[in-house]
Image: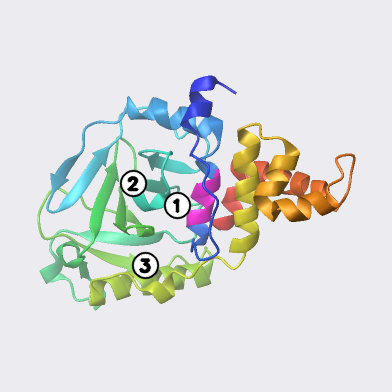
């Protein structure tokens, strides 16, 4: 592994039992440890145009010919921080949580009940644009975020609105959940905690992520086991030639590498 890339890896901090991550949050946690992704993001920073503000929306424009590098990410500003402090736009076909919406420039002329005016969203609003790209709008507060695939509209005038649409060809349960998140944010001016529940597999994912972190730093197997399960258990049951503990460590590392390389996609669909 390139030394500069290894230094850019997120610092290892053991996860606590109370730490809550959504499926999308876990997906990014694994992806941001991928050395190839780290290199791609650092290279991409040099090709991203300065951001600007339009009608209360921060606009990030990517240059012509910008490559997506095959990770399913349209744009990521950094990969050395959790998703709470990072701007991440996923590809529409990868994440079932992304909402399709029609953009209207004159919402007063619309008769639909679900016309949502952008200025009424009290959260960070970031728009991703670029040549030949469908604009993507990110509504964000910490780790909670909603991404909207914007159909039509130019985002150059004040007073624009979105009309969200269900995509019937996608995971309908995830689409409905995303809609509930969006309408709650619009009506209550804040993200609903109950609509961003932690992933049910969080405990196992945390163990796998910790094992991956330590493996990436070339930590000896026994030391990884101590970090995961405690020194007393390792002293009692460790068998370097084979046994339950070392097999479990190896399984966690294999799983972590898979999740880092492509398995994170399973958490988004």
Q: Is residue 39 left or right of residue 108?
A: right
Q: In this view, does 158 lie to the left or right of 25?
A: left
Under tag 2, what secondary structure? Answer: loop
Q: Name the residue under label 1.
A: 92
Mark found first going from the N terminus, 2 or 3: 2
Distance between mark 1 and mark 2 Cα atoms: 10 Å
Classify 136 as above or below 16: above
Q: Kindly indicate whether the residue at mark 2 contacts the one at mark 1 (C-beta within 8 angstroms).
A: yes
Q: Is residue 184 left or right of residue 256?
A: left
Q: Is residue 263 visible?
A: no
Q: Name the residue under label 3.
A: 165
Magenta segment includes 262: no
Which segment did they paint magenta? Answer: 25-30
Distance between mark 2 and mark 3 Cα atoms: 16 Å
Q: Which percent across, then down, holds residue 136? A: 32, 50
Q: Residues within 10 Å of mark 3 (few under 14, many from 20)?
A: some
Residue at the location (38% across, 58% down)?
Answer: 143
Q: Which percent across, then down, holds residue 39? A: 48, 27
Classify 187 as above or below 214: below
Chief secondary structure of the magenta portion = helix
Residue at the location (22% across, 44% down)?
Answer: 59
Residue at the location (60% across, 49% down)?
Answer: 209
Q: Which colour scheme is used?
A: rainbow
Under tag 3, what secondary structure? Answer: strand
Q: Mark 2 points at which residue?
A: 134
Q: Kindly indicate whether the residue at mark 1 contacts the one at mark 3 (C-beta within 8 angstroms).
A: no
Mark found first going from the N terminus, 1 or 2: 1
Under tag 1, what secondary structure? Answer: loop
């Amino acid at each position: 592994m390139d030394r500069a890339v290894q230094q850019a890896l997120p610092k290892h901090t053991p996860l606590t039992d109370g730490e809550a991550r959504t499926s999308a949050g876990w997906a990014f946690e694994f992806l941001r440890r991928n050395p190839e992704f780290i290199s791609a993001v650092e290279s991409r920073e040099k090709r991203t145009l300065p951001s600007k503000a339009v009608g209360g929306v921060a606009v990030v424009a990517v240059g012509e010919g910008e490559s997506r590098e095959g990770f399913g990410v349209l744009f990521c500003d950094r990969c050395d921080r959790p998703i709470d402090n990072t701007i991440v736009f996923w590809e529409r076909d990868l994440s079932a949580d992304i909402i399709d919406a029609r953009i209207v420039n004159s919402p007063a002329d619309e008769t639909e009940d679900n016309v949502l005016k952008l200025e009424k969203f009290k959260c960070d609003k970031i728009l991703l644009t670029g040549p030949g790209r469908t604009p993507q709008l990110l509504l964000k507060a910490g780790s909670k975020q909603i991404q909207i695939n914007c159909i039509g509209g130019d985002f150059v005038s004040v007073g624009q609105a979105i009309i969200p649409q269900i995509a019937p060809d996608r995971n309908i349960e995830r689409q409905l959940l995303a809609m509930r998140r969006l309408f709650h944010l619009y009506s209550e001016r804040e993200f609903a905690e109950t609509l961003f529940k932690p992933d049910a597999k969080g405990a196992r994912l945390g163990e796998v992520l910790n094992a991956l972190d330590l493996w990436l730093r070339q930590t000896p197997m026994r030391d990884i086991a101590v970090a995961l399960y405690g020194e007393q258990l390792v002293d009692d049951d460790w068998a370097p030639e084979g046994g339950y503990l070392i097999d479990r460590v190896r399984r966690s590392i294999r799983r972590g590498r898979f999740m880092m390389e492509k398995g994170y996609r399973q958490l988004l669909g």
